[in-house]
């Protein structure tokens, strides 16, 4: 895959590669894509959580129950 960039963006990418320790511009672009994938996954999880039914109230009794389950 080849990507054409105007000179201003090419200069920015080159600067980021040097400043952030990437070996090549391809490594930098791959990192950007991975970060975007993670951000989209997190957004999906947040939206799913927002649309989910409310869970139990996290009060003292709730945490006491959790501690009891952990202790066995």
Image: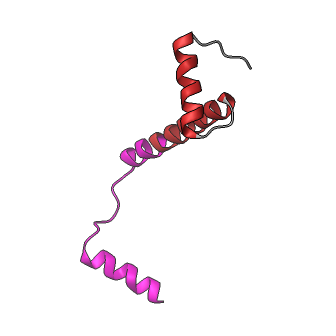
Q: Nearer the viewer, residue 27 or 36?
A: 27
Q: Is residue 69 above or below residue 22?
A: below
Residue found at the very far right of the displayed protein: 1
Residue found at the very far bottom of the displayed protein: 72
Q: Residue at x 59, y 25 (%)?
A: 14
Q: Quadrant of residue 59?
A: bottom left
Q: Nearer the viewer, residue 43 or 18?
A: 18
Residue 27 placement (x, y as % from top left) = 67, 35
Q: Is residue 32 left or right of residue 42?
A: right
The reply to whether the magenta stretch includes residue 65 is yes
Q: Is residue 61 left or right of residue 21?
A: left
Residue 44 placement (x, y as % from top left) = 48, 41
Residue found at the very far top of the displayed protein: 6
Q: Residue at x 67, y 16 (%)?
A: 3
Q: Is residue 43 above or below residue 63?
A: above
Q: Is residue 49 left or right of residue 24?
A: left
Residue 7 placement (x, y as % from top left) = 56, 11
Residue found at the very far left of the displayed protein: 60
Q: Nearer the viewer, residue 53 or 43?
A: 43
Q: Which residues are magenta?
A: 44-72
Residue 39 placement (x, y as % from top left) = 49, 39
Q: Residue at x 44, y 83 (%)?
A: 69
Question: What colour-coding does the image apply?
Answer: secondary structure
Q: Nearer the viewer, residue 19 or 34?
A: 19
Q: How many marks?
A: 0
The reply to whether the magenta stretch includes residue 16 is no
Main SS of the magenta segment? Answer: helix
Q: Residue at x 74, y 20 (%)?
A: 1
Q: Is residue 71 above or below residue 25?
A: below
């Amino acid at each position: 895959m080849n990507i054409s960039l105007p000179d201003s963006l090419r200069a920015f990418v080159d600067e980021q590669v040097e400043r952030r320790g990437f070996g090549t511009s391809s490594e930098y672009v791959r990192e950007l894509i991975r970060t975007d994938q993670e951000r989209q996954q997190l957004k999906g999880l947040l939206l799913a959580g927002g649309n989910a039914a409310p869970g139990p109230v996290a009060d003292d009794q709730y945490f006491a129950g959790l501690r009891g389950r952990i202790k066995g």
